[in-house]
Amino acid sequence: MESHSNSHTQEPKDWTSDLKQPPKDTRPKTDDVLNTKGNEFADYFLKRELLMGIYEAGFEHPSPIQEESIPVALAGKDILARAKNGTGKTAAFIIPALEKVVPSKKKIQALILVPTRELALQTSQVCKTLGKYLGVQIMVTTGGTTLKDDILRLQDTVHILVGTPGRILDLAGKGVAVLKDCTTFIMDEADKLLSPEFQPVIEQLLGHLPDERQIMLFSATFPVIVKNFKDKWLKKPHEINLMDELTLKGVTQYYAFVEERQKVHCLNTLFSKLQINQSIIFCNSTNRVELLAKKITELGYSCYYIHAKMLQPHRNRVFHDFRNGACRNLVCSDLLTRGIDIQAVNVVINFDFPKNAETYLHRIGRSGRFGHLGLAINLITYEDRFNLYKIEQELGTEISSIPPIIDKRLYVAPTMMDEAPQKPNQQQAQQTHQQQRYGQQRRRPDHQRRMGGGVRAAAS
């Protein structure tokens, strides 16, 4: 009889089995995201609707920065958190922010500040993805868009406001963004937000928030200005430092010693030999970005370009299309060094070597996202040699001379080992370039202005 009754006993159904979860990520990962305590997201007693969003976004287990931050943030403590680029910082503050919002309270309850418009759009999208079952209203606002649209949007309910400091201060100063009930104040890329251009705006914004508020600062680098801000504004903050070393474990770094006029030829060689899933190529000026994009197109490779002098709607479109895989290569200025998370990027090329360690660190952090493997290649001229040495010393890292053949296992996912490098296609490259030029309505730079032979030199 006993066995008969047991045969009809049904196990409780696992609620996660009905979720539309993406396939498991089988790519190898490094200790940057694997060196955890073994916690699960369910251990934090989060709302089921939030867990549904987390799992459907493909998040499997909390990364180290998420393990350290989420429980402390949920307890309402101020946080000063330092962790490497690409290790899950964004979700480390978005998950507790979403958990603490009360949807029935039709007020702005959390403010997330970021230094660039592209990062604001990306962060708000992560908020919407993770919080899609919560009924939480998220708004993104940045400069470069019409104030009127933002004013109209704020007539409706907004629970979480994401944006750049100047625009949010403008809205708060006009009494349109009411922050008196906003008890969560988050700064991502805090070192940049506390630079001289932003800090006065940040401090004015804090004046619009209630006295009882939680401040959370996240960044990969924390200069002295951050300490001064912490001492003035944060109340007994919980400090997290996961920076045993500065560079990501999964990013292999090389340099190629070239003359300026050889750079384009060298880039052509890299394109023909490397197995690039997607690449970001950095230049040190907006003028060089456009000239290099033109030269890459002439070589027969499709590429987009993006820089700060482009109109915001066009920047948004380029960023969106590149992220969705419409093009393999993106040439840009340092506009995209901070926080931008495009998982498919496995190669970063510094066509122009940066002047300081902080910029270098943020640039190479665009590959090797979330513990995956990536490659950073630096084209070094005679003038760059001292900078190379200085940056190696400051970051405590080694940038090796590029070998004749780079082992694919250093930067290619095992499932993609058999794919061939990209091949030139003049027609497709020209079409991509024309589409971008047609879509860009702004004052064109003077292409006659010369900038050194590297970008002008045709690949032989």
Image (cartoon, helix red, strand yellow):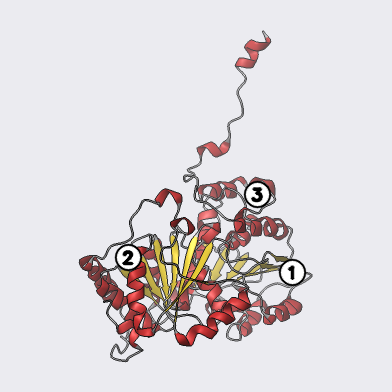
Residue 89 occupies quadrant: bottom right
Residue 272 is marked as: 2
What amino acid does circle 3 point to?
Leu
Q: Position of residue 249 (x, y in %)?
A: 58, 62
Q: Which residue is mark 3?
A: 46
Q: Which residue is mark 1?
A: 212
Disc 1 or 3, which lies upstream in sequence? Answer: 3
Farthest top residue?
1
What amino acid does circle 1 point to?
Glu
Residue 127 occupies quadrant: bottom right
Q: Secondary structure at mark 2?
A: helix
Give the quadrant of the C terminus: bottom left
From mark 3 to mark 2, how far is it between C-alphas? 48 Å
Q: Is residue 341 left or right of residue 452?
A: right
Q: Is residue 145 left or right of residue 139?
A: left
Please rate how many residues cluster around mark 3, counting C-alpha atoms within 10 Å: few if below 14, some from 14 to 19, many from 20: some
Q: Residue at x 64, y 57 (%)?
A: 66
Q: Residue at x 57, y 79 (%)?
A: 391
Above or below: residue 450 compared with residue 141: below
Q: Position of residue 309 (x, y in %)?
A: 40, 82
Q: Residue at x 74, y 58 (%)?
A: 75
Above or below: residue 78 compared with residue 456: above
